[in-house]
Amino acid sequence: MNHSVQLKSAIPPELVEEFLKRLPYISESLLEYDLNADSHDQVRFALRPGGDDQAAVVSSRIVEVAEKLLKTRRAPSVKVLASHINRNISFDADPHPLLESMDELHRYGAGRYGFGPRLVQLISLFEREVCAIAAKYHAPVHQFPTLIGADLLHQARYLRSFPSSLSMVSHLREDMAAIQDFAKVAGWDGERLVHNPESLHSIQCLLSPSVCFHYYSWLKDRVIDSARITAVGKCFRYESRNMDGLERLWDFTMREIIFLGASQFVLDHRDRMIDETVALLDRWELSFEIRSASDPFFIDDYASMATFQLAFDLKFEILAPLPYRRKDLAIGSFNYHQDFFGRSFNITGANRAPVHTGCTAFGLERVALAFLAQHGVDSAKWPAAVADQIGKSG
Amino acid sequence: MEDAVSNSNLDQKVRALIVRTFELSDDDALSELRFGSVPGWDSIGHVRLVVELEEEFGMSIPTYLLPEILDVDSIVRETQKLISEK
């Protein structure tokens, strides 16, 4: 790497991953980069061929990202709600190649995978367990579209908070000439779809990045005391070069239990979901920890939002160790949004105050990966609670 | 008595700081100033206000206190404590 830039302040260890995750979005010219391992205050980088004239711009953007990450940053106050990480894990191989050799996993592209029957059974079993928890708390099943209106994401302030992860959807304009022109030139050139951008319609919809937004929109302008539901949906978060196997997918599946009502109702339900989840993960003999966390906002005020989330205990994540990577993976979260969505969608309680909302969310592919990374791909060696059920379902 | 006087003084300073931070009108200084009810005093605004308070009063506000200081009274109370502990 032939370029380097000195940061004004060192990146604290707990922010290194977050910092590095943001660098792919700096410039299309950026080919590779690293942060010096000792002092965390210098980034070395290389640019794509022909991009050397971009070095100054890339350098200043790297400094800008670091500054925004650190602006108003406070010492982290991480809380650990549950720590079940002392299980004896004997497996430490990467499950990806093993699953591929068993024809249980097929990679279509970065962040896009297909799953074979055993993997589907594992995911379905976990989902059934979560649905049983939902049923216990009288949370009926709902179904939402994979497409989400740009208006809805605008209302949820998602467009501005997470712009880098959006996946836009378009279609051809209702114009005979544009359709015929598309059909004539459309094809794959090895890197991208060949087409005339002018033939595309303006964007009304995106691929949904989350499940619960649809429910808040469903309840828009309603007066409602409390509600609990569950839903599963395909979710899409583009993560550039950070997409990596099943750890970080562009196209993934999320099962959520969503609750809304008065603040205490939501917080009580979140506590119960945490207890239920701990019991479930214990049955699956997973090694995990539940810790306070913040969302990866892609905004100038990232540090403020992260500080606020941590200080107000708005988010807790389930972190499961991946032995083959020697790092943890977030496989689910417990979120409390205060009255943000109640205000955004004008959902009020009987007292006319905006309702509070919360959700428990599981990334199903990540749950499966954590399980396979800790227990291996041989189902004969899986915990009985899982192996017996998978056996029953064929 | 002395505490009451200094509290009153602090109350005015905190109100002035909130008005300045969120660019309110001077008339707003006497109204009920509270997180969520003042334009701009949202999640990001709250952290910004905390930074302003720290600079104004030369103190460090622990992160765990952020949910406890959501209106003028609570800010004055906790600021008073933090100043006296310096």
Image (cartoon, coloured by chain):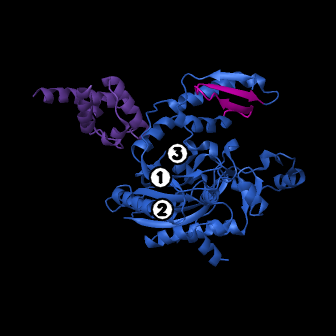
Chain colours: A blue, B purple
Asked whether the viewer can see residue A213, the reply is yes
> Which of marks 2 and 1 precedes in the sequence?
2
Q: In this view, which residue lies farthest toward the right?
A: A184
3D distance between C-alphas at marks 3 and 2: 20 Å
The magenta-colored residue range is A26-47
The three-letter code of the residue at mark 2 reads: Thr
- What subunit carries mark 3? A
What residue is rendered at 70% in x and 31% in y? A33
Q: Are marks 3 and 1 in contact (CB under 8 Å)?
A: no
> Looking at this view, is A137 or A385 the one in front?
A385
**Labelled disc at residue A251:** none
> Which of marks 1 and 3 precedes in the sequence?
1
The image quadrant that residue A358 belongs to is bottom left
Which residue was labeled with disc 2? A277
Which residue was labeled with disc 3? A295
The answer to whether residue A30 is magenta is yes
Asked whether the viewer can see residue B20, the reply is no
- What subunit carries mark 1? A
The answer to whether residue A166 is magenta is no
User: What is the crowding at mark 3: few (fewer than 14 residues within 10 Å), some, or many (at least 20)?
Assistant: some
**Image quarter in which the C terminus of chain A is found:** bottom right
The three-letter code of the residue at mark 1 reads: Ile
Q: Are marks 1 and 2 in contact (CB under 8 Å)?
A: yes
Image height check: is A352 above or below A46?
below
